[in-house]
Image: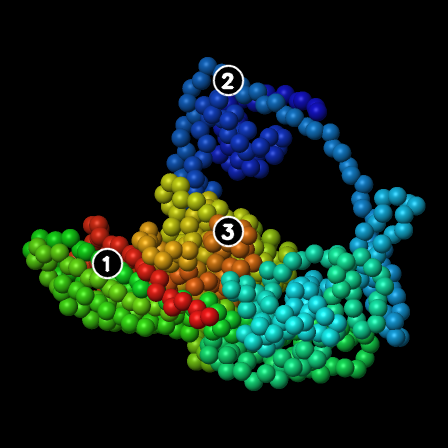
Amino acid sequence: MKREQIRITRETLYEQVWTVPMTKLAETYGLSDVGLAKLCKKHEIPRPPRGYWVKRQHGKSVKRPALPASSVSEALIERREESAVVAPKPEPPEVIVGKRRGRSHPVVPARRATDSSMPITTAWVVPRRMQWIREADRRMMKSQSGFSPSTARRSARCACPCSEIANRPDGIGPSRAPAEIAPESTEIPRGGRRVAHGESVSFDRVEAAEHAAKVEPQAATIADSGGSFPGATACVARAAGHRSGSSMSRIFARCAAQAAILILCSFSTASAVGARTFEFEYDVTVPPLPEGAGDVQLFIPLPAADARQRILSEDIAASVPGVIQTEPVYGNRYYQVSAPANGEPIRVTLRVTVERRIAKARAATPEEDLTPFLGENARVKVGHPVLAPMLEEVRAVAGPGATPEKARAIYDWVVDNVEYKKVGTGWGNGDTFWACNERYGNCTDFHAMFTSLARTEGIPARFEIGFPVPEGQTEGRIGGYHCWVEFHLPETGWFPIDASEAFKNPEKRELFYGTHPADRIHFTTGRDLRLGPDHKGPALNYFVYPYVEVGGKPWKGDVEKTFRYRDVTAPASS
């Protein structure tokens, strides 16, 4: 390791720190940003505060503290350079093209022996997008005929060769299947069979796919779930009926048939399993206000009702009668109480019974306008230069255009680069600038970042907010809100994601891309909300807590609010 000492005046280092970001400046001296920060602290050199570089980028002036006097005039930087060890580049895998029935197929070595005297073992590699089909076969279809006796009970739930995955209790789809590529035999026996981990796995499933494609109840189940997947039925028909051509063509057709059937089944999963019923109580108390303070307007959000969430009962008890209103842009419902301040508290208790289902991808309604989900909000920026570095990384992975691959790349970027924590002030507003600069916050900041990137790339993204309802307990008190997002593409329909929960639960990262579990209650949609003509103050950033105006101005006092739930899901019949 080489050591190099650099002497620099405090004045020079002070100027550099305030003109070049710490991370970049540290690289020029061969230090980490933490090491450079310690050096500045040691020599009493003030550093830029949080938000400094964003303000400079937007042309705002920022006051710079003067360099304090010190008995030491120079800073000594010890630069360490480790000798680079260049690892030899691995040899590219050898590709052997074999012939079978007049068509070629690639056979790629899965492992290269370190001992030259040992034979090189090769493997027929299953394409990544179809590995989960092999996993479904391994679990369900052990027998050579295609159906083992143990599949009878599973088939009763969903007449589909992929029911083992599509009907899993946690609602996890194919993305949770193992992604290993490990068959280690170059032999390709008759019947399209491959050997993996010493276990025989068959792709000869045309009969199973054809049988599943003919099952009529699937169409009704998809209709009940409130969604569809355009083109999936045609894909099943084409793939399941493909019997001519080479062996490889038939194998890919069979895989495509099973994949299409699984997609269809994933829409019916929410109807088949995962429904949950619970009671939710929302209690609000506005403390007494002195007479003459002006008219009091109290706005309380009400839960949404759609294909994912059914309101079984709703009861509102209030000390002052109110009315149910509807916000015009997104159709959010709310309860409004109007009363003069008279020295008495205002109490409102909302009790609802909700049936919540696992939310999967679903088609947009024909009359639905996607324009509101492409535009900019006060705190959610679209097409702003501050997003350029993030978009460059995303486009390097997924290329240009509004595609499913782009949406996934944005989700992965947010989960990998934003940290869930609540430190100091500034987080929790769902602010793009905050998320870009600080890279931490709560669910609103995660999903502001996702929404800004998605909308900039032409992908509609919809913000929804409500409350978490834990699944592992029968009742309890809820501390605060939770929010999530759906994006829309023609290929996917409305597709649910929850980036902040994916960060907090890394083992469920795939679950929260394409699934909203039944562990939540949805109240309102959208940002920058205005609640009718009696709402005189500024638009609401989001609407999940009570909002109070007194005399036409937002009231800054404390509103007592509590949230409770009780699970009343009926036990499953045996």
**Could you classify mark 3 by the number of other residues whose Cα lies within 10 Å: few (under 14), some (14-19), or many (20 or more)?**
few
Task: Give the structural element (helix, strand or loop) at label 1.
Answer: strand
Q: Secondary structure at mark 3?
A: loop
Work out whether residue 14 can be spotted: yes
Amino acid type at image mark 3: Asn
Mark 3 / mark 1, whichever is N-terminal: 1
As drawn, is 530 to the left or to the right of 260? Answer: left
Q: Is residue 539 left or right of residue 451?
A: left
**Residue 10 in the image, given as x and y percentages of width and height:** 51, 23
The picture quadrant where one finds residue 28 is top right
Foreground mark, 1 or 2?
1
**Is residue 137 shown left or right of residue 371?**
right
- The kind of secondary structure element at disc 2 is loop
Q: Amino acid at mark 1?
A: Asp
Of the 4 image quadrants, the one containing the N terminus is top right
Along the viewing direction, whichever of 364 and 125 lies nearer the viewer: 125
Q: What residue is disc 1 on?
A: 283
Q: Position of residue 512 (x, y in %)?
A: 51, 59
Between discs 1 and 2, the one toward the N terminus: 2
Q: Which residue is mark 2?
A: 73
Q: Nearer the viewer, residue 104 or 88?
A: 104
Vertical side of 191 occupied by 58: above or below: above
**Res 457 visible:** no
For label 2, count other residues whose C-alpha is less than 10 Å away and answer few (under 14), some (14-19) or many (20+).
Answer: few
Q: Which mark is residue 96?
A: none
- Residue drawn at the location 26% of the way across and 65% of the way down: 351
Residue holding disc 3: 505
